[in-house]
Structure formats: C-alpha cells, structure tokens
Image: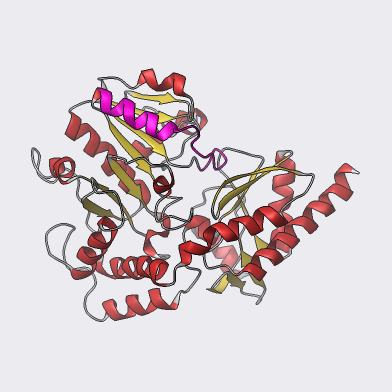
Amino acid sequence: MKLIKDFLKYQAKTTPHPLSIEIKNAFGSHIVDSDNKKYLDFIAGVSVCNLGHSNPVVIKAIEKQIKKYMHVMVYGEFALEPSVKLSKEIVSKISKNLEVVFLTNSGTEAVEGSLKLAKRYTGRKEIIAAYNSYHGSTHGSLSTVGVFDMQEKFQPLLPMVNFINFNKDRDLYKISSNTACVILETIQGGAGFILPEKNFLKKVKKRCKEVGALLILDEIQPGFGRTGKLFGYQNYDVEPDILIFGKAFGGGLPIGGFCSSKKIMNSLSFDPKLGHISTFGGNPVISSASYAAIRELYDKKIMNKINSKEKLFRKYLKHPLIKKINGRGLMLALILQKSSIADYLVKDCLKNGLILFWLLWEKKAVRITPPLTIQNNQIKLGCQIILNTLNKYQSKFVN
C-alpha cells in the first residue's frame, strides 16, 4: 500500500479518483497486481498494447538495440538504421501518396506537427475539426477537440478553428478556400466509437480536393491492426493527405508519427528551416520496438483473426442492459441503457478481475479494446464476467 500512498501523494493526477491498482507485472492479456491478483485486460492500456503485454519479440528488439546505441542526435540529422527501417516499413504498407514519415514522441505531438504542416503547405489559417472529437490535450490539439467544456478553462486556444458534425453531409460547405485542413478521426473515439457512414470520409476528401484543403486522418486509436487492417482508413476507400498515428505504434513504448507526400512534407524543412523539430523523435530503441511490432502483426497474421474475434464479442455480449455495440474489429464500445450502468460495470468488473474503462464523451459507453492477441477462451471468460455483472446490476436496481 505504500506505493499507492506515494502514487497519490507525489504523482500528478488526471482525475480526482484514479483506479489505483499497484502493478507487479503484466504478460499477454493479463495484468498482475502487488497482491498477485490476476486481471484479464480488455483495454490494452487504452488501445496501446496491441500485441499484449511484455511481448517477447518486442522485448528482444529492444534488448538488441539498447546494446548498440540509444539517443545519439536530435531527430532528422543522423541516419539511424532503426528509424529508417521503420519509416520504410510504414510507407510500404500505406497509400502511395503517403511517401515520407516524421517520427514523433506521441500521437498528440504528431497532431501538432500535422496542423503546422497543413498551414505551412497551404498558406491558409483555418482548421476544421468535428464536434465530439478528440485529438489530444496539448494547446494546438486541444483547439481541435470538439467538446467545448474541455476547452473553456484553457482559452484562448488557436484561432480560426471551426467544427462540423461527423457523418453530416450538410456541413461540408463549411470547408472552403480559406481552409488549410480538415482533421478527423477515422473512427470517432471519445464520442462512442462512431464509424464513418455513407462514404462520409470520401465526400470530405472530395470537398477538400475541390477547394485545395488537406484531409488529415487521425489513426492514433484505430491504427496498427485494431480494425483488421493496418490502418482504419483502409476499410473506407479513401486516401488522406496527412496520416497521424500513435498509441499501438510502439508495441507498448511511447512513439507517434505523421506522414504525407514528399512535396507536402518538404515544406517543413525550409522558410523557416526546422519547421517542426523533436529531440527524441525517432528514438532508435523505440523505433526498433515499433518495427518489430509491425512485423509481428504481419508475420503472425494477427490481423486476419480480428473479424472473427469481433464476432465472438458480438455473439456473447447480448443483454437487455446493452443497447448496442459500436465500433469495428477490436475497437468496440458497449452502449448501455444509462451512464450509471457503465460506471457500475467498470468498477464491479475490476473487483472480479476484468479491466474495462470508460470513453471520454459518451457517458453510457464502456470500451472493449483488448490486445489483438487475446485468445477466444479469454474473450468468452471476460464476456461472462460482464454478463454476470449486468445480471447483478439488474437484480439490484431494475427488478
């Protein structure tokens, strides 16, 4: 308990009441606390540990690189084999117009760099984002978060940021010749894992092309296999002008990135030089982990099993208190009848050895984003814990 006391005393908080589990170790789809209680992990560190915890392939890559060198120079000056290999691997797996990768320390930093890139390349100032979006909490990224309660206490933020409704064609007229970029999550995360409908992303891209604006797709959460494709946008027949990624990119370590065409990306390198810089971007140890994680997705054909695992969740999770299940692949959200059920579900499941978590904006939602390597029997076990908890809630508060 001393660690928990020190955690609460010395480490800054993001909420008044953190879950406060003292972690001993983690492996595969399980986390173990200091009392040796084992938890089945249905959130993967919030869509980070796609290959599970302590993946041996990732660990081996880290150990191998750390014996050679770690940090040697700021990003973009020296040719480091891990960073170059990683960039080349990503480019080989995505749209042909996305030719160059800028490696960052996080997804949010990649958002910041992307917004700057769009403004620099187009010479325009207006940014358009979506209501109920989430792109990060730094100054620029927060400016594009479409939930104004989150912004209010931190004003003034970036000027000339306007918003459209996700999946609403009627708002596309707002994208104009004044617009530098439109930034959208391919799948809206905090809003409840909302999928794009009726070719919405293609329509946005078409409108951007008509007026000379750039389309930025934020793949920080759906990226790296979670939807059954390396990136979520590959399910929707659309090509972004700038692609952002993070979270699972590092196999459990902190890294992000954004990519675009050579022509667009080159505008950050002159007038002024050093248009976007990073001390630790492309760190060779983390790049080694990231490359190993991507190769593991393909070598083990992990993405081929995502659709069948999604079907298992949808098969097992049927209950009167569940209104629907949003999302795609292993990026799923249970939408409960009311928010109090979501709160009860997360807290009671934790007591019973299952880790779930909330979403940012949709208060009736509970996220299910397990490691992509989760086994079918683990899916069944976790779903049974969820159903047992919902039955308990129903007997206590409904019947």
Residue 153 in percent (x, y) is at 46, 31
Q: Is residue 211 visible?
A: yes
| Residue 157, picture quadrant | top left
Residue placed most toward the observer, 390 or 210? 210
Residue 167 in percent (x, y) is at 49, 29
Quadrant that contains the N terminus: bottom right
Q: Residue at coordinates 77% horizontally, 49% vertically from top-left?
A: 319
Please, is residue 238 above or below residue 182 in the view? Answer: below
Please, is residue 83 above or below residue 317 in the view? Answer: below
Please, is residue 300 above or below residue 176 in the view? Answer: below
Colour approach in the figure: secondary structure
Residue placed most toward the observer, 328 or 126? 328
Instruction: Name the side, left or right, on which 330 lies relative to 137.
Output: right
| Residue 294, picture quadrant | bottom left
Residue placed most toward the observer, 242 or 27? 242
Is 191 within the magenta? yes
Residue 3 in percent (x, y) is at 56, 69
Q: Say how many tags the image has.
A: 0
| Residue 322, picture quadrant | top right
Quadrant that contains the C terminus: top right
Q: Can residue 49 be seen in this view?
A: no
Q: Residue at coordinates 44% horizontally, 58% vertically from top-left?
A: 225
Identify the magenta region: 189-210
Residue 284 in percent (x, y) is at 25, 68
Is 371 within the magenta? no
Instruction: Name the side, left or right, on which 177 lies relative to 356.
Output: left
Instruction: Name the side, left or right, on which 377 lies relative to 148.
Output: right
